[in-house]
Amino acid sequence: MVQYFKNMNYKIDNLQYCNWSRDIFKINREAELDAVHVTIVYHEDYDEFKVQIKKWENYFKDNSDLIFLGKSFKDIEKAKLENKTAIFFGFQNCSPIEDNINLVEKVHKHGCRFMQLTYNNQSLLATGCYEKIDSGVTNFGREAIKEMNKVGVVIDMSHSAEKSTFDAIEISEKPIAITHANPIFWHAAIRNKSNDLLKTLGESGGMLGLSLYPHHLKNNTNCTLESFCEMTARTADIMNVKNIGIGSDLCLQQPDEVVEWMRNGTWSKNKNYGEGSKKKPGFPKQPDWFKDARGFKNLEKGLRKVGFSEDETNGILGNNWFNFYKNI
């Protein structure tokens, strides 16, 4: 059994936020995904988070032949053996812990394994990437990071500003993650990341999940597979290829009002279009080569074509995330 796992390759998408259904769980199985990190919180407080947990309990019950709750890397191994997908919970905001450090341990007990310190705006923990002034990780943020390290919740800085992210890397005793973003050198989206930050992330043992969300892609929906894979190769020159994975940010079958809620939450009466626009306020169309997770097969071909070895390709498509999960 040990030898079997030693030679195993895993496929992991480390960020999806879909309008979940049995059809989507089937698509992820067709894509042979052994694990998916799913967003279950954007702006919800602790009580609202528990409502989401109930929803997922029903998903697990009704789709037990396809999915189950993942809590550690051992569940990814189990998923591979059982031809299922392990689902790992994550938050794209820190709202469920409210202003109570004790809630970090409680959300972990409910299955949370990733938590962003911010979602675009200033939070109680750190500064979001849409703020004009980045004051860095707050006092509460430092305590939260310490507690997250202790209980086993990964610090995710995907939507955070640069100084805050450097702070989180320095403060955290465990490697952090940017689960879904791309480098600025390729596409200057507000939420994409600088070379200096990616270099520091890689040197610290942290992980970058490359995003397939069109607003993060060069030429948006018209981004080519070749361009994406060439970007991946350039990123590997900045940070070790072993610190790169996929965090697709797929939002399959979500209605447009959901993206409006994601961007505005309950904090604003004015419409914020994020990286969209008034003319195109909704979810953008995925590139033809990555309409859903079955696009992993195209990624595999594209990565090999630009010069990645078989081992490096398997790492990007899942093994690197698997190794990261071992240290959560």
Image (cartoon, helix red, strand yellow):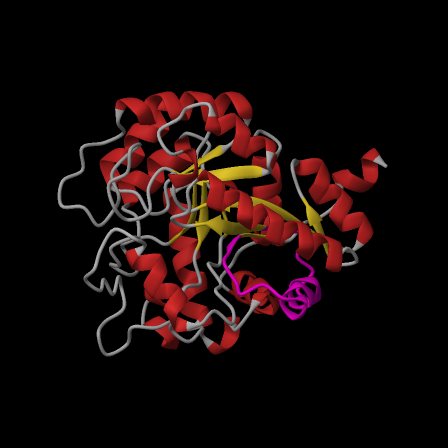
Residue 99 against residue 94 in the figure, above or below:
above
Residue 71 location, quadrant: top right
Q: Is residue 70 visible?
A: yes
Give the x, y percent position of residue 69. 67, 45
**Nearer to the camera, 275 or 162:** 275
State left or right for residue 208 relative to residue 303.
left
- Toward the left, the furthest residue is 132
Within the image, what quadrant is residue 108 found in?
A: top right
Seen at 62% across and 45% down, the residue is 319
Residue found at x 19% / y 62%: 270
Left or right: residue 82 versus residue 200 is right
Q: Picture coordinates of residue 53 (x, y %)?
A: 58, 46
Q: Which residues are magenta?
A: 15-36
On screen, residue 41 versus residue 12, left or right, reads left
Residue 137 point in image, percent of width and height: 27, 29
- In the rendered image, residue 322 lying in the magenta stretch gets the answer no
Q: Quadrant of residue 22?
A: bottom right
17 lies above or below 134 = below
The spot of residue 263 in percent (x, y) is: 31, 58
Quadrant housing the C terminus: top right
